[in-house]
Image: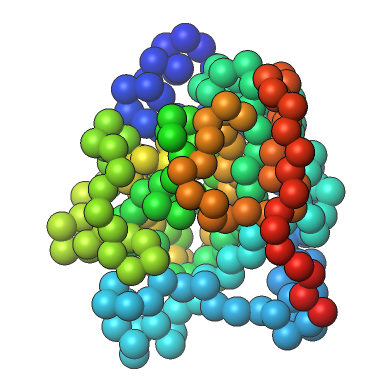
Amino acid sequence: MISAEDVQFYKENGYLLVREVFTKSEVEEMREAIEGIIRKAADAKLDRNAAWSNDFIPPEELKKLVLKGFHDVHYQHAAFTRAAAHPRMAAVLSQLIGPNVQLHHSKMLVKPPEKGAAFPMHQDAPYFPHANHTMLAGSVHLDDADLENGCLSVIPGSHKQGELPHVGKYYLNHKEYPISMGTPCPANAGDVLFFNYLTIHGSDVNKSDRPRRNVLFQYRDPMDPPTEQVHINWGQGLMVCGENPVYKEYHPNFALKE
């Protein structure tokens, strides 16, 4: 799927857009699965607005904006389990992380037409810090994404700065790091944007009449230990490539909610 030059680009810039990882039929299956998750969450009265708040978005504006975000979507539909370990995903991950790759978690992010909320610039690292920083995201585009409907923007090479001080839960000061500072990464449905969890990224409001639906998978080297016991979920540790070099039993310490 990618060349040695692509791998070098990722190392230098902290991101890589890979075209046509998923077929039209695979994309359509994931779109339908997302709509089903939103519908079932609403029926269960577990639907919520995941838009960023605090001082980034004024309260009067926040009321108008929506972001649908649900974690661990591979527990909800097998389409995402297949996508997470898809051979074409594995072909890229094995070159960006190494021969052994582990799934950390998955989530979906949906920006509805005309009111899809922005993401302030941030690093993912504060949410689930790891010792060796092998963690990266694979953001699967289920719609064509451009500036009009809030495509992702990144700051190339920012992963080399290490973990930066964040505010809130967790984003960078938007006065120092406006979204306009980033390099837009327009993509087509089926493309995947891979980026290191230290790479600064964000996205603007969806101003178009089109949705912007993404599914994001976070991966790591199984020998890269977390520095904090946060963001733990069932199924964490699923091997996508290779093997786990050491035997470990995964037992999250939490109880089911009724």
- Lateral position of residue 213 relative to residue 168, left or right: right
Give the vertical position of 128 relative to 43 (above or below): above
Q: Is residue 140 left or right of residue 76?
A: left
At which x and y percent is residue 136? 50, 37
Say which quadrant the N terminus sits in.
top right
Residue at position x 22%, y 63% in the image = 174
| Quarter of the rendering containing residue 108 | bottom right
Extreme residue toward the top, this view: 4
The quarter holding residue 255 reads: bottom right
Residue 111 in the image: above or below residue 101 = below
Residue 140 on image: x %, y %: 60, 44
Q: Whole-percent x and y of residue 206?
A: 44, 66
Name the residue furthest left: 176
Q: Nearer the viewer, residue 72 or 234?
A: 234
Q: Residue at x 64, y 64 (%)?
A: 70
Q: Provide residue 91's location: percent of width, then percent of height.
A: 65, 20
Front residue of this view, candidates 203 and 243: 243
Residue 23 seen in this snapshot: no
Please state the total of marks drawn on the protein image: 0
Q: Is 108 located above or below residue 219 in the figure?
A: below
- Please give the name of the residue rendered at 29% of the width and 73% of the height, measured from the top-left corner: 56
Q: Quadrant of residue 47?
A: bottom right
Residue placed most toward the observer, 83 or 143: 83
Residue 208 visible in image: yes
